[in-house]
Image (spheres, helix red, strand yellow):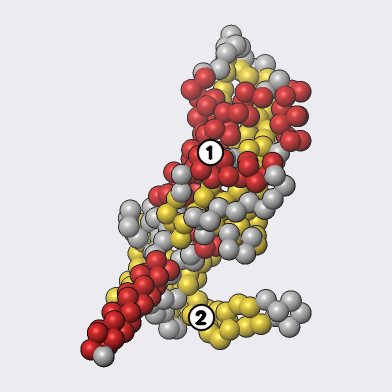
Amino acid sequence: MKLGRIFLLLTVAALCLASAVQAQEAAGKKKLAITKIAATDALAQRMAKQGVGLSLDSVLQALDSQVYDRVLNTRRFELLERSDADALAKESSAAGEAFAFNKADYILTIRVDSFNDRMEERRLAALGKTIRARTIELSAVAKITEVATQRAIASTNFKVTKRDSENRSENTTGRVGEGSDDLMIQAVSEMAGKIAMRAADTVSPARVIGKRDRVVTINRNDQSGIAVGQVWEVFALGDELVDPDTGEKSREEVLVGKVKITRVTPQNSQGEAVEDSGIERGAIVRLAEEPEAGVE
């Protein structure tokens, strides 16, 4: 009888420990797998016909590494090994099956659907100069899939345009390669930042984690797209809402204030509450306004 009680107590303790571990895992970082970034077939064929396939390859490789770095440094996810995700995605596609990566909570898939790199020239004969304006346009679609349900929870088209101009004398015939690469890197870096911010906001929306007087702390760091001068709106979560047409569930969000970012660190960000009708810890924050040019 005594042994039976001991066994029962040990069983209960084990169950409690298992529950605690599961709860701790649930509250931790979500696991994300990022598949290899590729261009759509139509874009790849167009670039090949134009003889600039190598330029497109450079963009894809740069974007691949930049996105991985930006997502990792948001500190919102535990990223899984790229080689594993790519191999499983390829294998599933070949077998005509849905992509399932059991170790991940979410899958991030990115397809570049447009890329243009053009140069426009304007000759100023009176000054003996040629004005050259180079423009890079990059467009990509990022999709986040929830592994457990195989449901796409977000799909967003991102577009970036970078323009650079330079004055060249009549005798100048060449361009500096480093300058050419720099504009492309700027476009790729901005695209990667937008994708990383969207991924973080979709899976784990920015929240207020601290408030002291008018100083509000937000759980977004210097790699998440947040910047000094931005204005973020703060929303308190209310009742659960159900769409009568689709049955989709959501939460009521009530605007309770605005915060202007004043400090960004590798851990989090702080701002001043410029409007406050009930800002509290746990409230969701979303970007409302970008800073004006020259404001820091």
Q: Amino acid at mark 2?
A: Leu
Query: Does residue 36 lie above or below 169 as drawn?
Result: below
Q: Residue furthest left?
A: 2
State which quadrant residue 163 falls in: top right
Q: Position of residue 284 (x, y in %)?
A: 47, 72
Q: Is residue 156 left or right of residue 30?
A: right
The one nearer the camera, 209 or 292, is: 209
Quarter of the picture holding the N terminus = bottom left
Q: Residue furthest top?
A: 171
Measuring 38% from the left and 52% from the top, which residue is drawn there?
222
- Image mark for residue 289: none
Q: Residue furthest bottom?
A: 1
The one nearer the camera, 196 or 95, is: 95
**Residue 214 in sight:** no
Q: Amino acid at mark 1?
A: Asp
Measuring 47% from the left and 57% from the top, which residue is drawn there?
31
Label 1: how many Cα within 10 Å (few below 14, some 14–19, many 20+) = some
Query: Does residue 36 lie above or below 11 as drawn?
Result: above
Q: Nearer the viewer, mark 1 or mark 2?
A: 1
Task: Give the residue number, with chain letter if any, for mark 2.
Answer: 237
Measuring 50% from the left and 30% from the top, which residue is drawn there?
182
Q: Position of residue 248 (x, y in %)?
A: 67, 76
| Mark 1–mark 2 distance (CA, rounded to whole Å) | 36 Å
Measuring 61% from the left and 57% from the top, which residue is drawn there?
145
Q: Is residue 168 left or right of residue 70?
A: right
The one nearer the camera, 177 or 37, is: 37
Task: Give the residue number, with chain letter if any, for mark 1.
Answer: 64
Q: Position of residue 65 (x, y in %)?
A: 48, 38
Q: Residue furthest front?
A: 1
Cβ–Cβ under 8 Å for marks 1 and 2 = no
